[in-house]
Amino acid sequence: MRLVILTNEQLKEELLSTGVSDDCKIDWISSPKELLSHTNTDALIDLLFEDNSYDVSHLNDYLRKPVFVNSMNKTIAEIEFPVIRINAWPGFLKRNIAEVSSTDETNKNEAEKILGLLNRKIEWVPDIKGFISPRIVSMIINEAYFTLEENVSTKEEIDIAMKLGTNYPYGPFEWSKKIGLKKIAGLLKELSITEKRYKPSSLLIKEASQQ
């Protein structure tokens, strides 16, 4: 099977962290423009979908093939394209289980085969904004910013306390650096439109705007 994967170096490294089957050939590209010369493939994985402002025009030549997109803030219904959503925030691709959403049963079968070649099992989740683990991590980061706003402690101390107290791999501020504070702020803003408990900290918004 031949895949074309639109990605940057960081996400490419994470995707390869679990290895690749010998039956899988990958064409690596870094821009949607390069897709024009890579239509003779079995599937497309667009890990830069959010970074390209959700422009779906480059997907038109892949209508009959499985298309994975890294879309945290938009659902499949909102994208208006029969895509398979995957949680590809920085840090999350290192796991051997992928959070994936699809509204098409045929796509689900194909998705399991394709991600199996990348040595990943699929955890199917509802087609909701933010999936599951990004919502949780974003809320942890948001609460850490509220704590910082109240001068309870420093970023370094909060990170240490969370790692020692909960055995998290990263503290909330370390996590925010790995994922990108703009991504965190964007998801929280989107979720807070309908669920006020996701309202982002003003300090989080301020720091995200400075990046």
Image: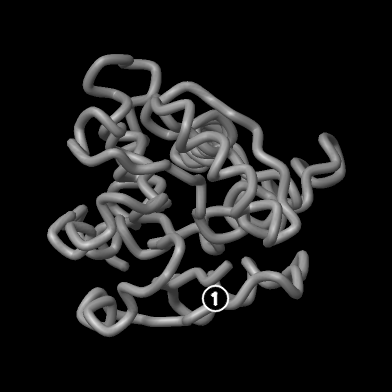
Residue 155 vertical placement versus 107 (above, below): below
Give the residue type at disc 1. Answer: Gln
Which residue is nearer to you in this view: 39 or 55?
A: 39
Tell me residue 173's x, y (percent). 58, 53
Tell me residue 79's x, y (percent). 21, 39
The image quarter containing residue 75 is top left
Residue at (33, 79) in percent of width and height: 38
Which residue is nearer to you in this view: 65 or 116?
A: 65
Residue 72 vertical placement versus 76 (above, below): below
* Left or right: 27, with 69 as reference point: right
Which residue is nearer to you in this view: 90 or 63?
A: 63
For the residue carrying disc 1, how many other residues have a C-alpha within 10 Å: few (<14), some (14-19), or many (20+)? few
Tell me residue 176's x, y (percent). 52, 54
* Left or right: 12, with 19 as reference point: left
Which residue is nearer to you in this view: 156 or 76?
A: 76
| Quadrant that contains the N terminus | bottom right
